[in-house]
Image (tube, grey):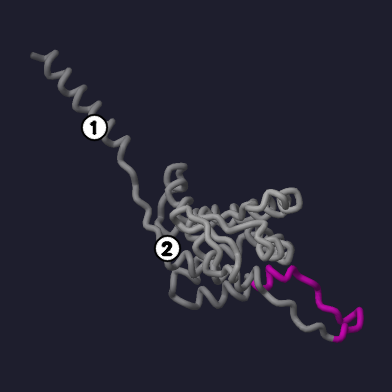
Amino acid sequence: MKKTLTRWIIAAATGLLAACAFITVNVYFPEKDVKQAYQSLDEMLLKQEPKEEKQPLPEQQKPAEKPLSFLHSISFANEAWAQDDLGSKLAAELAGIPEVQQAYDEMRARLPQLNALRDSGAIGEAADGRVVVRDQSKAASAQAIVQGENTNRKTVIINMAKAILRVNKQPETKDALSQVLSKAAATYADTKRDEAKTGWWIQLANGRWVQK
């Protein structure tokens, strides 16, 4: 009798542990707010126009120079945190991360080349948030630009996924990050589709390529 009871307890405990192993924590993904955050970051850090040049001050009166993206991110952070919406807070948090600032600095520097490749149809916006070469005859000239752009985009998307986990007060586990990362990438791609100009190649969420 004791042996039977012991076996039953062991079997029940094993079953419970197995069931627990398959429990997946669903992390809330605020898609609308994330998209707003991506748009805000692009407006503040990627599409910023150079300011009008002013007459240089005498050497002794020149203020100390600071990186442009850093100044914009600080200003944007102060404005965003004064608001109450999650999209602004996510954008402010990412704008204050040095590696994200660096990613946007590099993306802004290559933007004219990237746009020229998109205008020519050599590259397109993929549904996973990357840019990809579509015209293989131009692959050699586009590859380095594409690789650099995708590396920077990956930095932005990963940091967005981490920020979402913090919003949800979830530990940064491999499974949780993986769950949010794909959604963060898809939302980034959606943002880029919206921003695409007429004639650019974009990949829809269903995988089909079209010219906007």
Q: Name the residue under label 1.
A: 16
Counting the numbered discs, the total is 2
Q: What residue type is labelled 1?
A: Leu
Q: Which of marks 1 and 2 is nearer the N terminus?
A: 1
Q: Is mark 1 on a helix, strand or loop?
A: helix
Please state the horizontal and vertical placement of residue 130, each as a whole percent of the image: 58, 54
The answer to whether residue 21 is seen in the rendering is yes
Mark 1, other Cα within 10 Å: few <14 / some 14–19 / many ≥20:
few
**Which residue is nearer to you in this view: 191 or 44?**
191
Relative to 23, say whether 99 is above or below: below
Which residue type carries mark 2? Glu
Can see residue 165? no
Kindly identify which residue carries mark 2. Answer: 31
Task: Tell me: residue 11, above or below residue 20.
Answer: above
Distance between the Cα atoms at labels 1 and 2? 34 Å
- Left or right: residue 11 versus residue 106 is left
Q: Say which of marks 1 and 2 sits in front.
A: 2
Residue 198: % across, % down? 59, 71
1 and 2 marks in contact (CB < 8 Å): no
Q: What stretch is highlighted in magenta?
A: 55-72
